[in-house]
Image: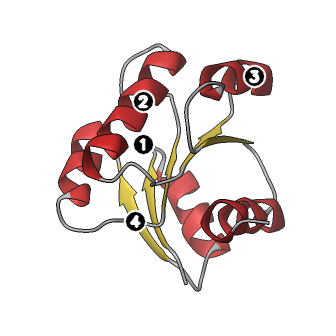
Amino acid sequence: MATVVLVDDDALTIRRVADALPRDMVYPCLNLDALRATLRIIVPDVVMTDVRGVGGCDAAEVVRDVRGILDAYARSIPLVVHSARDPREIERVRVGLHDTYALPKPCTNDRLRAMLWTVTEGD
């Protein structure tokens, strides 16, 4: 069982992810301020974030901000960028950032679970 913090401002996405991960603890955060508050309470196994609506307007800025927030709490927390933006853009944004992965939206529940396993257990 993993502890997952999901940073996303879309209630439907939050529900889908929680439903896809029934054995995991999913903590939703609507924005980066909520992420900071949540990290004061728990250290998750993984953080998943969208890039629209949760922080600044620029995807690269949001991902760098989230990575910086995570590094301030515990450097080894994996970050999964879960976004409907062009997958090539998200891949460019995450390159060069340690422990940061890309998972395009939409994705199947199996793909979501596989990504979670990959970043928490390794393969």
| Quadrant of the image containing the C terminus | bottom right
Q: Amino acid at mark 4?
A: Pro
Q: Look at 18% across and 53% down and name the residue there.
A: 37
Whole-percent x, y for residue 38 in the image: 24, 58
Query: Mark 3 highlights which residue?
Result: 86
Task: Tell me the distance, in whole angstroms, between the alpha carbons under discs 3 and 2.
Answer: 16 Å
Does the image show residue 31? Answer: no
In this rendering, the answer to whether 97 lies above or below 38 is: above
Rendered view: 85 above or below 42: above
N-terminal-most mark, 1 or 3: 1
Give yes or no for contact between labels 3 and 2 (Cβ–Cβ under 8 Å): no
Q: Residue at x 39, y 36 (%)?
A: 66
**Distance between mark 1 and mark 4 Cα atoms:** 19 Å
- Crowding near pointer 4: few (<14 within 10 Å), some, many (20+)? some
Query: The N terminus lies in which quarter of the figure?
Result: bottom right
Residue shown at 72% from the left, 26% from the top: 91
Disc 2 marks a residue whose amino acid type is Gly
Q: Is residue 39 left or right of residue 11?
A: left
Q: Are marks 2 and 1 in contact (CB under 8 Å)?
A: yes
Residue topped by disc 1 = 9
- At label 1, the amino acid type is Asp
Q: Which mark is residue 44?
A: 4
Mark 2: few/some/many CA within 10 Å (<14, 14-19, 20+): some
